[in-house]
Image (tube, rainbow, N blue to C red):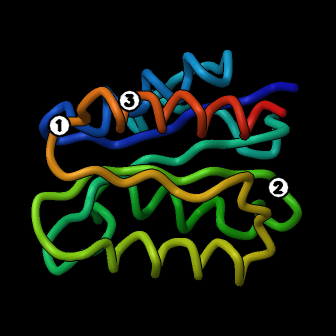
Amino acid sequence: MKTAVIYWSGTGNTESMAKAVAEGAGAECFAVSEFSGNVEDYDAIALGCPAMGAEELEDSEFLPMFESCTDSLNGKKIALFGSYGWGDGEWMRNWEETCKNAGAVLACDSVICADAPDDDATAACKALGAALAE
């Protein structure tokens, strides 16, 4: 199964999560600015983005990429992850709903963590990657 992990990270927290997801999935890992492929070329996709502003996706790089590929998520196996510094995870619930409405198939529960991922969050990211690659 060809799997990609695509993420945006401002502080390195979501990047650390992405690397753990990629390790768990045996996947290629791309910062959103480095991803030049098409999600259609992959069997499964993990997407990572931290909460920004009023609990929303980062809007200068990640959101435009995500919006450009939303139609391609129909029937696609995906997983979502990200870090946050405030709030209660509303951005992730909204993001999950957007993906479900686009027809994406969530491989497992999304993983969120406050600030830098600790050992438990890193293990959860690896498990997310493994579930995505099944």
Question: In which quadrant of the rendered view does residue 68 lie?
Answer: bottom right
Residue at position x 40%, y 63% from top? Answer: 63
Circle 3 or circle 2, nearest the eye: 3
- Number of residues whose C-alpha sits closer than 10 Å to that of mark 1, classed few (under 14), some (14–19) or many (20 or more): some
The Cα–Cα distance between marks 3 and 2, rounded to whole angstroms, is 24 Å
Question: In which quadrant of the rendered view does residue 55 lie?
Answer: bottom left
Residue at position x 74%, y 69% from top? Answer: 71
The Cα–Cα distance between marks 1 and 2, rounded to whole angstroms, is 29 Å
Q: Position of residue 52 (x, y in %)?
A: 19, 65
Tell me if residue 12 comes above or below residue 132 in the rendering. above
Q: Quick one: SS at disc 2?
A: loop
Tell me if residue 34 comes above or below residue 7 in the rendering. above
Question: In which quadrant of the rendered view does residue 41 lie?
Answer: top right
Tell me if residue 68 comes above or below residue 55 in the rendering. above
Residue at position x 61%, y 19% from top? Answer: 28
Marked residue nearer the N-terminal end (3 or 2): 2
Amino acid type for the residue under numbered disc 3: Thr
Amino acid type for the residue under numbered disc 1: Ala
Viewer-proximal residue among 3 and 130: 130
| Count of numbered marks | 3
Marked residue nearer the N-terminal end (1 or 2): 2
Horizontal placement of 46 versus 42: left or right? left
The residue at the far front in this view is: 120
* Mark number, residue 76: 2
Q: Position of residue 83 (x, y in %)?
A: 27, 51
Residue designated by label 3: 122
Viewer-proximal residue among 41 and 107: 107
